[in-house]
Amino acid sequence: FFSYSDPPRRGNDLKAMIKESLKLERSSLEFYQRLASKTRDTDMVTHKMAMDAMADEAREERKLTALLD
């Protein structure tokens, strides 16, 4: 996953918080993509769970991206 980073210095900087959340969502999405790829032919249960998690992360990524537009 993406390494921990300090919160924005200004607690009222909503745009910075959304950008940070977006980075974390993308990091999670990459993790689940790698997991799905590694388990595709060897562990169908884990593969399915990773695919479901990827779909959830992608939805959240779209929501956060829309907030920045």
Image (cartoon, rainbow, N blue to C red):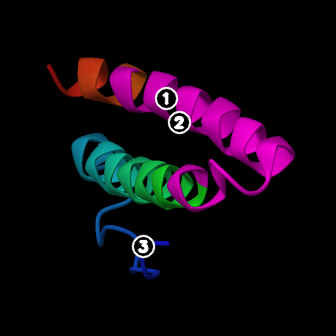
**Stretch in magenta:** 36-62
Q: Give the class, few, some or many, for how many residues have Cα within 10 Å of label 3's Cα (few <14, many ≥20).
A: few
Quick one: label 3 or label 1, which is nearer the N terminus?
Answer: 3
Q: Picture coordinates of residue 64 (x, y %)?
A: 36, 29
Asked which secondary structure carries label 1, the reply is helix
Q: Residue 15 occupies which quadrant of the picture?
A: top left
Callout 3, which amino acid?
A: Phe
Q: Residue at x 79, y 53 (%)?
A: 43
Q: What secondary structure is the magenta-colored segment mainly?
A: helix
Q: Nearer the viewer, residue 3 or 69?
A: 3
Q: Decide which of 33, 69 is in the foreground and name it.
A: 33
Labelled pair 3, 1 in contact (Cβ < 8 Å): no
| Kind of residue indicated by mark 2 | Glu
Disc 2 to disc 3: CB gap under 8 Å: no
Q: Which residue is mark 1?
A: 60
Marks 2/1 in contact by CB < 8 Å: the verdict is yes
Is 19 displayed left or right of 69 in the figure? right
**Mark 1, other Cα within 10 Å: few <14 / some 14–19 / many ≥20:** some
* Mark 2: secondary structure: helix
Quarter of the image for residue 61 reads top left
Q: Is residue 44 left or right of residue 54?
A: right
In the rendered image, the vertical position of residue 32 relative to residue 2, given as above or below: above
